[in-house]
Structure formats: structure tokens, C-alpha cells
Amino acid sequence: MTLIPTFNDFLATDWARLHPGDTNADAQWAVYDQAVYERVQMMLTDPALQCSEGAATDILAEDLLETFFDSEWVTKRFALADTRGLGDLRWLLPAHRRRELARRVYEFQSFPWFQHFIDHTRTNEVPSALFEGDVLSALMHLPATVTRNQTTGVRGQDFDVLVEHFGEQPRIPVEVKNKDDDAEFTDTAVRRILKKAATQLPGGEIGWVFLRIPSAWVGSRLEDEYDVMLHDAVRQTSKIGAVFTAIDKGHVDSERKTVSVNRVWHYFPRCDAPEPLWEASRNLYRLLEQGMDFLAPRAPF
């Protein structure tokens, strides 16, 4: 038995027993989410657990991932997550990603594209699949309609997410890219990944690109050269209206004796983007900076 019931298991048992025939999706999720929240709170305050909240979260995350994938997959993908006793911080990013992937899996359960997200994650590298999930989660906090696009393999139709009815912009196709943690910081690398993103956006439309770059890129070169690289790459295509770059930084709090991973966003707008898209891009960046926590599912752990 898993520590947290899945949404489907909840529908087949508790919901079917208490609300037979009721198919209101919003009500189903609200009741399920509250039930899981209460169960998690009981676990976190159980004196028999005898571990920190962070350790309890790790246990919940690993258990939930094993429910949707399997223990071998989780162990292989997050091999370094439980090696914090070795005296360095190699475990930090894998442990952070394990928690965050579990949160995205929990939050996406009620959506029709959920199984496709699971299948995509199972067959791709975790950092790439997780960042796509993070972008989906962020966009779902907007007052807009957000849909995960099915992979087609067709040029111009293979983008990741579609945002509709956000402000005055009727449609915003979104492509999500992730650079490997050991990727070298070069103009060619930046240009190549944005060129690839542009080919996946629809012709005749202008959209957003989300890009996660390695924390090793942070430094004076990034500050001095990155905007120039983005400008040179974006001006080669009419399809990219803005680039949102995510940088994950490890943080050590010596006073509290804690470590964490903080995400910083860099925003690069296209100067000649249409006014509705310019406004939508600026509003999204403001919300990313503020840390959005409303209008979308949020994991209780």
C-alpha cells in the first residue's frame, strides 16, 4: 500500500462510495487533495516517524514515484540523491529533482494528458522531463487555458505547451528546452538550441521558449554575453517572442545548517514582438519572479 493514494484509486474507492455517479472533476480533485493534505499532515506530526520534515518529504516523494514508475527506475534515475553522507553536495540537485518530480506527478494526476507526461518522463532524462513539468506548472498558474501538446514529430507542430486566452493574446505556443548540466557555455550552444526550438513552433505564429541552463554557466561571461547571444539567435527567426531562462543555484545556509536549490529567472523579450504578446510576456515574468502559488494544483508535501 502506498503512503499517498493515487487520484484514480481515490475515485475508484472513496469517491465512488461517497458520491456515486458524481463526475464533477473540480469537486473530485478538491476532496482528494484535502484528504491527501490531511494524511500528509498526520504523517509529518507523527512522533513515531522521528525524522525531519525534509526527510519525510523525501520518503513521500520516493514512494509516490515508485507508484507510477517502479523502484528500479527511481533508484537508477536518482542514484546520487541518497549519498549526502559523503561530505559533498553532489546529492543536492538529484534529491531536489526527486522531490520536485514527485510534486509535478501529484499535481498533474487529474489532467487528460497525465499518462502521456508519465510515459514521456519514463523514457527521457529526468532534468528535461522535470523542467517541462515545471514550466507546465508555472503556466497553469496563469489566468489562461494551458494544454500540454501531444508530440507529433511534425516540423512546426511539435511544441510542448499551448497557452490560450491570456490577456489579449489568443494563442501562445511554448517550447521547453533543457541544457545538460555539463554542457559548455558557447555562442554556438545557445544559438543551436534556440534554432531547434524555433523549428518546433508553428509557422506564422510567435511564441515563448523556456530554457534551463546549467548553474556552472553563472558568472561574468553570462552577465556580459548572454543577452547578446540571445539577441543574435532570436533575430534569425520570427517565431520566438520571448525567452525565459531558468538557472538552479544550490544555496547553503550556514546559520540554519540547511541546503536548498533556488531557481532564478532571466527574461529576454523580443523588441519587435506584437504588443499583446509583449504585455503577456512581461506579466508572466512578473509572476515568475514573485513565485506563483495560486490557480493551479499544488502538492501538499
Image (tube, helix red, strand yellow):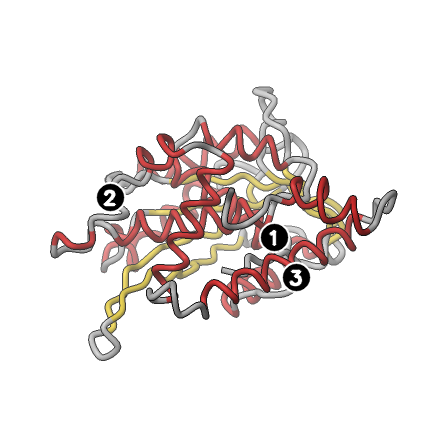
Q: Which mark is residue 80?
A: 2
The answer to whether 31 appears left or right of 194 in the picture is right
> Are dots 3 and 2 in contact, CB under 8 Å?
no
Q: Distance between the Cα atoms at labels 3 and 2?
A: 33 Å
Residue furthest to the bottom in view is 255
Q: Position of residue 185 (x, y in %)?
A: 26, 43
- Check disc 3 and report the residue beneath it: 34
Q: Position of residue 229 (x, y in %)?
A: 36, 46
> Are dots 1 and 3 in contact, CB under 8 Å?
no
The answer to whether 289 appears left or right of 202 in the picture is left
Q: Position of residue 251 (x, y in %)?
A: 27, 65
Image: 135 above or below 190 = below
Q: Distance between the Cα atoms at labels 2 and 1?
A: 30 Å
Identify the mark nearer the N-term, 3 or 2.
3
The amino acid pointed to by label 2 is Leu
Check disc 2 and report its element: helix, strand or loop: loop
Q: Residue at x 59, y 51 (%)?
A: 272
Front one among 231 and 177: 177
Check disc 3 and report its element: helix, strand or loop: helix
**Residue 159 placement: quadrant:** top right
Q: Position of residue 292 (x, y in %)?
A: 57, 65
Q: Crowdedness of circle 1 by 10 Å Cα count: few (<14), some, many (20+)?
A: many
Q: Residue at x 35, y 47 (%)?
A: 213
Check disc 1 and report its element: helix, strand or loop: helix
Q: Crowdedness of circle 3 by 10 Å Cα count: few (<14), some, many (20+)?
A: few
Residue furthest to the right in view is 21
